[in-house]
Image (spheres, rainbow, N blue to C red):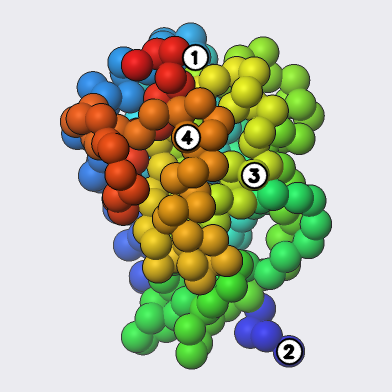
Amino acid sequence: MPNVYRFRLTGLYLSHLFKSATRQDHAHLAPLVRAYLPADGVAVDVGAHGGQVTRLLAGIAHRGFVIAVEPSGYARSILRLALYLRGIQNVAVVAMALGASAGPALIRTPLKRHGDMGYGLANLVDGGKSFIAEPIAVVTLDALVACLALPRLDFIKADIEGFEDELIKGAAHVLRTMRPVVYMEMDDGFLQRAGSSLDMLWARMTDSGYVPHEANLTKLGVPKAGDIMWLPVERV
C-alpha cells in the first residue's frame, strides 16, 4: 500500500504558498510570451505547480482565459490559494494530467529531507526512495479542449517531468487545427524515464509543422535540451 497523499497544514506548506503567491521567477519570459499570447487569448499551463507561470499567463491574457492543469493535490491546493490571494479570476484549475490516452494513473511526489514535499518533481513513474502517491485521471489535450469547447488556443506551456511527449501525442488535433505556440521543457533524462527521448519528441514536433527556437528566438537546427519555444512553421 503506497503512502497516499493527505493534506497537512505545516510550516513548509505555508512557505511554499508564500513563495507561489508573492514571487515571480519567470518575469523574464513576459516579453516573449506577450508576442504570441494576445490580451484576449487562451493559454494552457500544463504542469502548473504553484502557479507562477499561470499568473504570468493570466496577466498577459487579462481579457482572455488560462487553463491551469495540475494533477498533484498538494500543488493544486497551493495554486488555488495563490490565485485567490492575488485576486486572479481568469484561470480555471483542472485536476487531472494530460497524456496520450485516457485512464487512471498514480502520481508520485518525492519527499525531500525532513519530509518536505518536492512537489515540482511530481511524476507518473518514479518517486524515489520516499514519496507520496495519489490516484489521478489522465485525459488528452484534444479531449480537454473539446470538453471545454474552447474556440481557440494560442499558447501552451508544458513542464511535466518527461511526459511532454505523451502530452503531444494526445494533442495532435489541437496542434493541427489551432496551431498554438508551444513552450516546453525538453530534458532527455526525464523523457527517457517516461519511455520517450529528446530525439523522439523533437521529431514529433517537427513532423507536426513546428520549428524550434531558443528562448531568445534563435532558430535551432539540431535537437537540444532545455526550454524550447516551438512556433508553427507558418509563423516563422
Q: What residue lies at 48% left-to-right and 90% top-to-bottom?
A: 129
> Marks 4 and 2, Cα distance to the nearest angstrom?
42 Å
The label on residue 169 is: 3
Choose between 228 and 10: the one closer to the eye. 228
Look at the picture and state if 195 lies above or below 200: below
Task: List x then y, in percent, for residue 70.
Answer: 57, 50
Q: What residue lies at 40% left-to-right and 13% top-to-bottom?
A: 235
Mark 4 or mark 2: which is in front? 4
Task: Residue 179: name its quadrant.
Answer: top right
Residue matched to label 2 = 1
How many numbered discs? 4
Quadrant in the picture for the C terminus: top left
Q: Residues within 10 Å of mark 1 (few under 14, many from 20)?
A: many
Q: Earlier in the sequence, mark 4 or mark 2?
A: 2
> Marks 4 and 1, Cα distance to the nearest angstrom?
24 Å
Q: Earlier in the sequence, mark 3 or mark 2?
A: 2
> Marks 3 and 2, Cα distance to the nearest angstrom?
31 Å
Residue matched to label 4 = 206
Q: What residue lies at 44% left-to-right and 13% top-to-bottom?
A: 234
Q: Earlier in the sequence, mark 3 or mark 1?
A: 1
Q: Determine the secondary structure under disc 2.
A: loop
The label on residue 41 is: 1
Task: Residue 195: name its quadrant.
Answer: bottom right
